[in-house]
Amino acid sequence: MPDTLPLELDAPPCRLRLLTPDDAPALHHLVNDWEVVRMLSRPPFPYPRELADEWITATQTLCQKGEGFYFAILGPDGRLAGCIGLRIMPLPQTGRAPHDNAPRVGQLGYWIGRAYWGQGFASLAASRIARWALAHLNIDRLTATAAQDNVASIRVLERAGFRHTGTDRQKFVARGTDLPVELFEATRTDISQPRSPKKAPDSAGQAPAATAQLPHRTLMPLPPLALQAVPRRLSKRADHRPRPKLTEHRRGGWSWSVPQHSSTRLADSSGSQA
Ligand SMILES: CC(C)(COP(=O)(O)OP(=O)(O)OC[C@H]1O[C@@H](n2cnc3c(N)ncnc32)[C@H](O)[C@@H]1OP(=O)(O)O)[C@@H](O)C(=O)NCCC(=O)NCCS
């Protein structure tokens, strides 16, 4: 069993690597957008520039302690397109105080800058991180929440193999209120068992680009939950403006030891680079 954790991951045409302080200006530019922040529970709006620095520093501390892993999602042009991360927490156990051997969960969160929406980046990144986390981390399962009106995110989770487990309410700081959220989780079994039937090709007979890249997944038909949550104006797909020119991007190439799951059964061979 490897004693290092791959922290650069391919999710073609995207690449994932840990956030670095150099990402702060681009991160701030992308996240300081009402359409992004309103769907995230904790960030305020406007999003202060210094918060980007503080948040990246906090993610590095969590990573060093093995308590969180936060990745930059780099688009095909090598630029920051969004972020995806996991916070590792003890599994809530009713009536029991947390203890060292308590099962742990990885709470998944992500966002994509508006200019990059609708290109499959979130689906690719969520699938890749889910497989990576369940293959390499000492966690029992992954959990995620999405606001009930966040049809795109609900779809991302479903495509990544998450199961709907219930509903709750959660505070959304930017919106200044509690909102209903849908709860999801994924175990190793959920992620490793493909579901069928496969989604029909589009009118040109081509599978969507992201679909072709999703590791070990076929698409589920759109379930009632996502259909219920689709507000009419959300059905408009994101822009398809020309992408910026390809630029060279700094590669971190970091890896360090973290506890490995003793009963890992999920293979993670699709493109990880130690
Ligand atoms: C949710 C979000 C991450 C999706 O990112 P994305 O890269 O555009 O998502 P994908 O291209 O992988 O699309 C995923 C699915 O959502 C659908 N979708 C994407 N944007 C959509 C939109 N504006 N309206 C409706 N559906 C949309 C896609 O068609 C796709 O569904 P399909 O599998 O049936 O084709 C992005 O919109 C975002 O960052 N929003 C703000 C922050 C946020 O919501 N974060 C998640 C918090 S839980």
Image (tube, grey):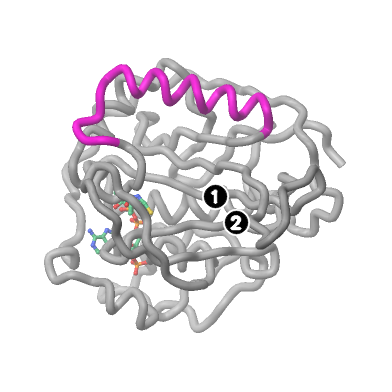
Q: State the SS at label 2.
A: strand
Which residue of the protein is positioned furthest toward the left in this rendering? 233
- Using the image as rendered, state which of residue 204 and residue 140 is in the foreground: 140
Q: In which quarter of the image is ligand 1?
A: bottom left
Q: Which residue is drawn at 20% across and 46% down?
A: 35
Q: Which amino acid lies under the numbered mark 2 shown in the image of this protein?
A: Leu
- Report the span colored magenta: 44-66
In the rendered image of this protein, does residue 15 appear above or below residue 143?
Answer: above
In the rendered image of this protein, does residue 9 appear above or below residue 109?
Answer: above
Q: Quadrant of residue 217?
A: bottom right
Q: Residue at x 36, y 31 (%)?
A: 80
Q: State the SS at label 1.
A: strand
Q: In this view, does 146 lie to the left or right of 258?
A: left
Q: Which residue is drawn at 36% across and 41% down?
A: 42
Q: Return the x and y of residue 165 as percentages of the image width and height.
A: 52, 72
In the rendered image of this protein, does residue 58 appear above or below residue 148?
Answer: above
Which mark identifies residue 142?
A: 2
Q: Return the x and y of residue 250 as percentages of the image width and height.
A: 47, 18
Mark 2, Cα crowd under 10 Å, few <14 / some 14-19 / many 20+, is many
Mark 1, Cα crowd under 10 Å, few <14 / some 14-19 / many 20+, is some
Q: Quadrant of residue 231?
A: bottom left
| Magenta stretch: includes residue 161 | no
Question: Which residue does the numbered mark 1 point to in the structure image?
Answer: 107
Q: Are marks 1 and 2 in contact (CB under 8 Å)?
A: yes
- Using the image as rendered, state which of residue 49 and residue 160 is in the foreground: 49
